[in-house]
Image (cartoon, rainbow, N blue to C red):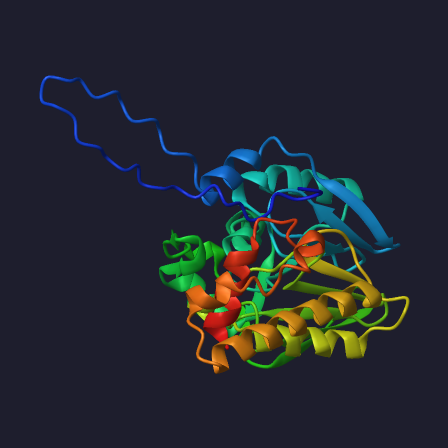
């Protein structure tokens, strides 16, 4: 995967047992493969952080976990998302190389592990954490992402957002104006995008998996139509020069985001017609409604059948 370690389908599966005669010795079962959490944490300390300059004061950091945006200036450093905890030393090294100002603010785009696992480390480094209120609710209690069969314990207090908002919040920091806007029931129930008005940069978080089918976490409030509405809001704000940072994948722009939006709407419309006609989930999957799109979009770890499943279940 380019730039960042992304969702993986190496999920732990229980090995099936077979009957053996009493006198036959059973070979030891192989160790189960690492799950997503273990894979990301193992990669954190050894994966380099790629730094891309978006403008003089705004930078994109890509390592293990979701894409990170950093704003530097006289008020200190502002960071959007914190990646995986084991990658925090590498992320802090990258921050220190940008300039000498201390880290002051951390904004979470949503609650998922690969965007918030580094919260405690960045808070200990001086960051005050801001997020939509559902991010704090989710991090404060055990959670499960059903489609990936992953469970998460409550986060430590030092990882929790210290200030939350419901719909939107405006910040003035480092000579820029930032708009933090909640997009309800999109990738999760906690998603926001962050717009830098002066810098003409928008971090859209996991509303956008650039170049691949996205995860939609229906177990914590995500829906395909909410994803489309959130993407529509960002498209309306952007111009041809806006740099749009996805949660995963390469840096993008309005044209690329519009193409992604068309894919989301196409799949949603196709699956909705199947569901309305009375097709079960299994029958809808068998119809292969994404077949003509897979060559372009099935490049991540959200495979076509999984994507059809989450779309069907959230319509």
- Left or right: residue 247 compared with residue 26: right
Q: Position of residue 182 (x, y in %)?
A: 61, 76
Q: Quadrant of residue 251?
A: bottom right
99 vs 241: above or below: above
Q: Residue at x 71, y 57 (%)?
A: 210
Rendered-image quadrant of the N terminus: top right
Q: Position of residue 174 (x, y in %)?
A: 79, 63
Q: Is residue 135 visible?
A: yes
Q: Nearer the viewer, residue 17 or 111?
A: 17
- Left or right: residue 45 compared with residue 49: left
Q: Residue at x 74, y 59 (%)?
A: 245
- Left or right: residue 310 compared with residue 233: left
- Left or right: residue 22 compared with residue 282: left
Q: Residue at x 48, y 81 (%)?
A: 277
268 vs 60: above or below: below
Q: Quadrant of residue 86?
A: top right
Residue farthest to the left, as pictured: 22
229 vs 81: above or below: below
């Amino acid at each position: 995967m380019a730039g960042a370690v992304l969702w993986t389908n190496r999920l732990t599966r229980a090995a099936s047992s077979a009957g053996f005669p009493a006198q036959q010795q059973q070979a030891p079962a192989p160790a189960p493969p690492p799950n997503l959490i273990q894979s990301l944490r193992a990669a954190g300390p050894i994966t380099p952080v790629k730094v891309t300059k978006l403008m003089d004061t705004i930078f994109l950091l890509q390592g293990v976990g979701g894409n990170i945006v950093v704003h530097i200036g006289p008020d200190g450093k502002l960071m959007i998302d914190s990646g995986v905890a084991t990658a925090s030393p590498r992320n802090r090294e990258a921050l220190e190389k940008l300039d000498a100002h201390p880290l002051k603010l951390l904004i979470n785009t949503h609650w998922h592990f690969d965007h918030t696992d580094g919260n405690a480390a960045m808070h200990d480094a001086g960051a005050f954490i801001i997020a939509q209120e559902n991010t704090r609710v989710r991090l404060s209690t055990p959670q499960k992402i059903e489609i990936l069969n992953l469970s998460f314990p409550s986060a430590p207090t030092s990882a929790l957002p210290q200030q939350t908002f419901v719909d939107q919040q405006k910040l003035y920091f480092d000579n820029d104006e930032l708009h933090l806007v909640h997009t309800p029931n999109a990738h999760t129930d906690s998603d926001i995008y962050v717009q830098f008005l002066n810098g003409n940069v928008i971090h859209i978080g996991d509303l956008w998996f650039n170049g691949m089918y996205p995860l939609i976490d229906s177990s914590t409030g995500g829906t395909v139509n909410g994803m489309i509405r959130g993407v529509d809001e960002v498209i309306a704000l952007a111009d041809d020069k806006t740099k749009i940072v996805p949660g995963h994948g390469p840096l993008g722009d309005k044209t690329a985001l519009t193409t992604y939006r068309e894919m989301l709407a196409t799949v949603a419309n196709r699956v909705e017609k199947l569901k309305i006609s009375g097709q079960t989930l299994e029958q809808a999957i068998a119809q292969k409604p994404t077949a003509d799109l897979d060559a372009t979009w099935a490049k991540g770890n959200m495979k076509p059948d999984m994507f059809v499943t989450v779309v069907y279940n959230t319509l």
